[in-house]
Image (tube, helix red, strand yellow):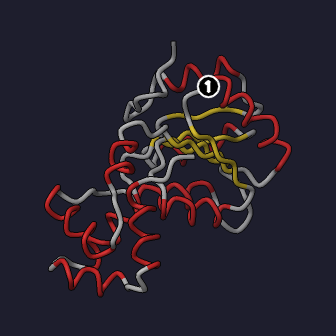
Amino acid sequence: MKISFGESLRRARIKNELSQQKLADMLFVTRSTIANWESGRRIPDYETILKLTKYLDTDFSAVIINNNEEKPVVIMVDNERIILNGGIPILRSVMPNAEIVGFVRPSEAIDYARNHKIDLALLDIEMGMISGLDVCRELLEFNPKTNVIYLTAYSEYAFAAWATGASGFLLKPLTEAAVQKELLQLRYPVKGLEVL
């Protein structure tokens, strides 16, 4: 897997034993600017990248060039491992150009989204203490353009799911045809997730 600019920056900062605030002070930016760069929500301008290269003694050119070739990131969150075991191969078949990651624990998916730009999230609605609706709200705070498709075996959740701004809704178990149909209706189209 290619390392994103944000991850490369975070590693270089830690290697140089700098906090986000210390690096921000060196560049005359806010700590939240550094956090946005590291999370992938923003990328600094060319002059700032040159300063980062100097301060962190790291060459970011290869990382920046590779950033243009990053795969779209798709996550599937379901507290039943059997659903993930059946669903992820279907997603990989339908979206061969995507990086697809599965999570049984919603908290792990939220942690992952803090450091990765999620293009599409397929979320089970009922997962115990944290619902898919809660996970959706968290994901949209990190990236408002995350497409969300809810997964459930219970159609009565459809109205609550639509209220969160979801792109779609799928009944379990997943099928290739159903996933392809939902990809055509994404709220925010994603390069690399097009249906052929």
Q: Nearer the viewer, residue 170 or 156?
A: 170
**Residue 146, percent from left and from top:** 43, 46
Task: Report the residue at 46% width, 41% height from top.
Answer: 147
Residue 181 sits in quarter: top right
Judged left or right of residue 44, residue 19 is right
Give the vertical position of 77 relative to 179 (above or below): below
Task: Report the residue at 20% width, 63% height from top.
Answer: 50
Give the vertical position of 2 relative to 32 (above or below): above
For disc 1, the marked residue is 179
Dot 1 surroundings within 10 Å: few (below 14), some, or many (20 or more)?
A: many
Residue 88 sits in quarter: top right
Judged left or right of residue 158, residue 28 is left
Task: Report the residue at 59% width, 27% height from top.
Answer: 95
**Residue 140, percent from left and from top:** 42, 55
Q: Which residue in the rendered view is the most extreme toward the right? A: 82
Q: Which residue in the rendered view is the most extreme toward the top? A: 196
Task: Report the residue at 49% width, 37% height from top.
Answer: 71
**Residue 6, percent from left and from top:** 39, 60
- Going by the numbered disc 1, the residue's amino acid type is Val
Tag 1's secondary structure? helix
Q: Nearer the viewer, residue 186 or 23?
A: 23
**Residue 168, percent from left and from top:** 52, 34
Q: Nearer the viewer, residue 84 or 95?
A: 95
Counting every numbered tag in the picture gives: 1
